[in-house]
Image (spheres, rainbow, N blue to C red):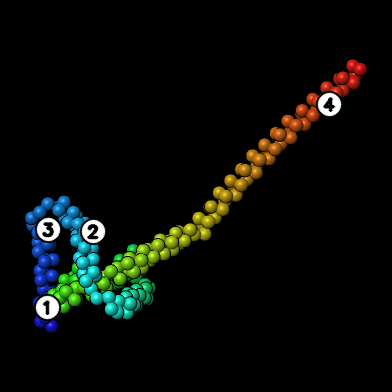
Amino acid sequence: MTTILTSLVPVFLLIALGFGLRARQFVPDLFWPAIEKLTYFVFFPALLFQNCRRAPLDGAGSLALAMGLGVLGTAALALAARPLVKSGPSFTSLFQGTIRPNTYVGLAAAAALYGKTGTALTSICVAMVVPLVNLLSVLLEKVRAFVGILQGFDGAKFGVLGRQADSFVTFLLENAQGFFTAISRQNCGEESTIADDDAKRCRVH
């Protein structure tokens, strides 16, 4: 227990330090988005790559299977709790908070507790879990949006759409009928003119 506490306390002290610097406005507010972006897209991937490169790959398949089953099992438990949460966006936040690991704290704790070997194995786990977690989160959001669209089209709206479609079809049919009637009348007029010309020629002869 003491080992775990001594490993995690520096992590939380570092977080508290960042919070204090932000609250005291020790650095400009523009500093934080830039450093977060740099950490997320440069420093953190470089750390994962470096640790995965030197990690032993023996048993990586079993480790990936164990991590994947763990994430899927946690996601299933979160989905089972869906009836307890009435709001869709709130459940989305709950679902992502349930299945997403805290990689920063996990890597720091692994490094403090188990050294380079622990950091390497944790990096492999992060590389396996993060894509699966992102995939599940996106799928949940897409399904929720699709269900919301279906729920938005109630019977009344379908009735309005149906009446609009009927009006449009009627408009097309009426215009098509007028168009073909005009063509027929024009053809009939031309035939009548030709017949009158023939009759005049016959009378002349």
Residue at image point 19% right, 76% down:
118
Q: Earlier in the sequence, mark 2 or mark 1?
A: 1
Residue 190, position in %: x, y? Answer: 77, 28
Q: For residue 45, what is the image quadrant?
A: bottom left
Viewer-nearest of discs 4 and 1: 1
Q: Is residue 73 above or below residue 90?
A: below
Q: What distance separates the C-alpha of mark 1 from that of mark 3?
A: 25 Å
Question: Alpha-carbon neighbours of circle 2 within 10 Å: few (<14), some, or many (≥20)?
Answer: few
Q: Secondary structure at mark 2?
A: helix
Q: What distance separates the C-alpha of mark 4 from that of mark 1?
A: 110 Å
Which residue in the structure is indicated by mark 4?
195
Q: Secondary structure at mark 4?
A: helix
Residue 62, position in %: x, y? Answer: 32, 79
**Left or right for 149, reference 19:** right
Q: Amino acid at mark 4?
A: Ala
Q: For residue 12, what is the image quadrant?
A: bottom left
Q: Which mark is residue 22?
A: 3
Which residue in the structure is indicated by mark 1?
5
> Which quarter of the rendered picture does the N terminus lie within?
bottom left
Q: Nearer the viewer, residue 160 or 12?
A: 12
Q: What distance separates the C-alpha of mark 4 from that of mark 2?
A: 86 Å
Q: Earlier in the sequence, mark 3 or mark 2?
A: 3
Q: Secondary structure at mark 3?
A: helix
Q: Amino acid at mark 2?
A: Phe
Q: Is residue 72 visible?
A: yes
Q: Earlier in the sequence, mark 4 or mark 2?
A: 2
> Which quarter of the rendered picture does the C terminus lie within?
top right
Which residue in the structure is indicated by mark 2?
41
Q: Secondary structure at mark 1?
A: helix
Q: Amino acid at mark 1?
A: Leu
